[in-house]
Amino acid sequence: MERWTGRVALVTGASAGIGAAISRSLVKSGMKVVGCARNVERIQKIADELKDEPGSLKPMKCDVTQEEDILAMFQNIKSDPDLGGVDVCINNAGLGHDTSLMEGNTSQWREMLDVNVLALCICSREAYKSQRERGVNDGHFILINSMSGHRIQVHKANHFYAATKHAVTAILHGMRFEFREDKVAAKVTSISPGDVETEFLNRMLKDDAKAQAIYSSSTCLQPSDIVDAVIYALSSPPRAQIDDIWLRPIDQLD
């Protein structure tokens, strides 16, 4: 991680769960981290906790369903003399709704597309633009994907969510091809976890007790496990392209 010391990482969905854990780890590794979410107060609390670490965490309020918010955030990063641009773009923001294909809610489908697919693409595009403008040739893009980006479960509440995550898998390969076409050494890595104990199910089911019952019914991954995968990918030598890391709890079968 030494080569990333003092460089800038953007982490979307940084207020809780995996995004918060990634932000903490990168700050401790000496990076300048921009953490964005709608709940910027939670990110500020994390930043206060990390004030004595080698790196720094700068909270930025951003609703990633709104392109104008994303573009304004990138302009603020560019204008900040301590930042200037994004070298590592970690697309962590994601959500699921308990909605099926045949009985689904259109607005919930649209929100999943906006967050899981379009926001990821917009942030990646703007980060890549930032790198090209500054002559940065070794940027890294991390896409927090899902095992649902590689298989379809029988549970109908998962089907549209899985479609958005299959899109992320396609985007991974498309980005890699475009980087090679542009003859830059930028990397893109997808990290595809199985069940992780975060606030994801609480928000999806809108029922804390039901979510906790599901998390308690088996061994789940923890956000720190995903952080380990992120650090592994970022620590790889320039010659190595880590395409996709799949990780699931030891007793998760599908």
Image (cartoon, rainbow, N blue to C red):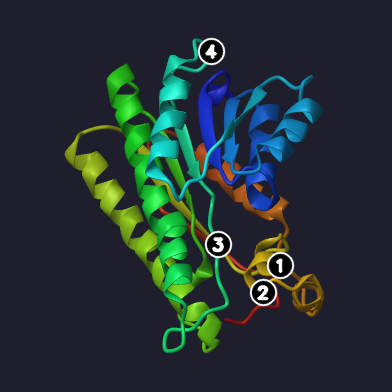
Please identify, in this view, whether the residue under mark 1 or under mark 4 is nearer the observer: 1
Position of the C terminus by quadrant: bottom right
On residue 205, the disc is: 2
Residue 204 in sight here: yes
Residue occupying the far left of the picture: 181
Q: State the SS at label 1.
A: helix
Contact flag, marks 4 and 3 (Cβ < 8 Å): no
The image shows residue 64, relative to residue 158, as above or below, that is above
Say which quarter of the image contains residue 190: bottom left
| Mark 1 to mark 3 CA distance (whole Å) | 11 Å
The image shows residue 144, relative to residue 215, as above or below, that is above
For this view, does 204 lie left or right of residue 85?
A: right
The residue to which callout 4 is attached is: 82
Say which quarter of the image contains residue 187: top left
| Mark 2 to mark 1 CA distance (whole Å) | 6 Å
Residue occupying the far top of the picture: 81
Say which quarter of the image contains residue 26: top right
The tag earlier along the polypeptide, 2 or 4, is: 4
Position of the N terminus by quadrant: top right
